[in-house]
Structure formats: C-alpha cells, structure tokens
Amino acid sequence: MTELHVLRVFCGPDGGGGNLLGVVRDGAAVPGERARLALTAELGFSECVFVDDVADGVLDIYTPGLRMSFAGHPLVGTAWLLRTTGDAPAVLRPPAGEVGCRWDGGFDWIRASARWAAGRGTGRYGSAAEVDALPAPPPGSGWLYAWAWSDESAGRVRARAFPRRGEAVVEDEATGAAAIVLTEQLGRPLDIRQGVGSQILTRPLPGGLVEVGGRTELVEIRRV
C-alpha cells in the first residue's frame, strides 16, 4: 500500500474546474509499466504520475492506455505537490527531458519545449459558442484542441480538448501540452479558459520554449 495524492490542476479563479490527476510520490511502490497502467486505468483519470526520484524530480506519466514522455497538467500538478511538501526540485525530469519549474503569484509554472507536445492538433472555430456546442468527442480521429478567441486583443481563448485515443476519457478538462502547442503557433501569451471552469496561462519563450502555469488544489489522499 502507498499514498496517492488526488489533485485538480488548472483550477479556475473561483476554484472550480481543474483536471483530476493522481500522483504517487513513492513510485517504487508501483513498479513496472504494467502495474502503473493498471492503476491509472482503475483510477479513471486522464493521467497519473509516478515519482521515481523526489530529489532529482525523475517521474513517469501514464494515461489509462499508454506511457507518455511529456504531458502538461501532470507536470504542473507534480510541481505543486513537491513544492508544498517541501521537496520541490527546480527541474522535473519526465522521459522527454528536463522541465524547469517556478512558482509565482499563486501559479505553478513549467517550462518545456513545444516539440515535446507534438501530435496534438488544433482546430480554430468562429466563436466560443461553436466550441461549446461540440459533442464529446467530435467526429474524426486524432488529438483535437478546439479553440476560438473570446477576446483576441486580451489574448483570451475558449478551448476544449479531445484526445480521441479510444480511451474512457473522451474530453480533458484542462490540457497543458495542447495549450503549449497553441501558444507556439500563435506566438503570444494566452489566457485559456477550458472545459467547465479551468484556467491555463501560457507565454512563449525564446528557443522554442513555452511556459504554462496554473493553480492546483488537493482533493484527497488515498491509500492504494
């Protein structure tokens, strides 16, 4: 048995929204890809993180169906958890590479290469209402980050995310990696309102890097 921290990542200004995430701080308690996939599928969250070395920030990320080299909301949530438990490294190390972390004004930020988020397609719609009206998931295949400007001059975006991987999770409430892709495409800071009430802030950096930040809240601690 070990502890699983259940978090909501990218909460909105009113505390609503946020994408559920499971984090096992003692990753050694759930060894091997098969066991980690099974636990992630049992939990039913879009992703789960297994921290293999707290001091060095080494971690593994899983969806219910596959191991991932990089994902946004798991890294933002893990940065928050390690910071609040007093173990926060300045860098997290998922399989993709080193991800810088910082905290500023209630937001935990990660800094990552936009190429690590490749494969998440974006689709622009004419209005926020059109995005809201989409079924979950929309027809078609492949990752879709559906978005529209809600206030272009202010950089405010309405978005919904559909992995379309054939898994139980048909829509992600908040998706950092897709937000990174969109920010790299548009080349400007964004204030993204996603799902039923989530907020994601982003900013492009030199060298193909993008920062993505958000609020995280603890839901519960389980024994698994």
Image: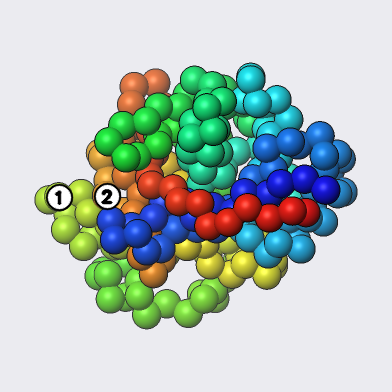
Secondary structure under the numbered disc 2 in the rendered image: strand
Distance between the alpha carbons at the discs numbered 1 and 2 = 8 Å
Report the side of 141 relative to 12 (left or right).
right
> Is any part of residue 91 visible from this angle?
no
User: Where does residue 161 sit, x and y in percent of width and height?
Assistant: 47, 61
**Mark 2 Cα within 10 Å, few/some/many (few <14, many 20+)?**
many
Residue extending farthest left? 153
The reply to whether dot 1 and dot 2 touch (C-beta < 8 Å) is yes
Report the side of 69 relative to 9 (left or right).
right
Residue 105 drawn above or below residue 154? above
Secondary structure under the numbered disc 1 in the rendered image: helix
Q: Please tell me which residue lies in front, 7 or 210.
A: 7
Q: Please tell me which residue lies in front, 122 or 190.
A: 190
Q: Please tell me which residue lies in front, 5 or 149.
A: 5
User: Where does residue 43 sit, x and y in percent of width and height?
Assistant: 71, 62
> Is any part of residue 39 visible from this angle?
yes
Dot 1 amino acid type: Ala
Q: Please tell me which residue lies in front, 15 or 9.
A: 15
Name the residue located 87 percent from the left edge and 40 percent from the top edge. Answer: 32
In the picture of the structure, the residue carrying the numbered disc 1 is: 154
**Mark 1 Cα within 10 Å, few/some/many (few <14, many 20+)?**
few
Residue 11 drawn above or below residue 196? above
In the picture of the structure, the residue carrying the numbered disc 2 is: 191
User: Where does residue 7 sit, x and y in percent of width and height?
Assistant: 54, 52
Tell me the number on the disc at residue 42: none
User: Where does residue 114 sit, x and y in percent of width and height?
Assistant: 47, 34
Which of the image's four quarters has the C terminus? bottom right
Dot 2 amino acid type: Asp
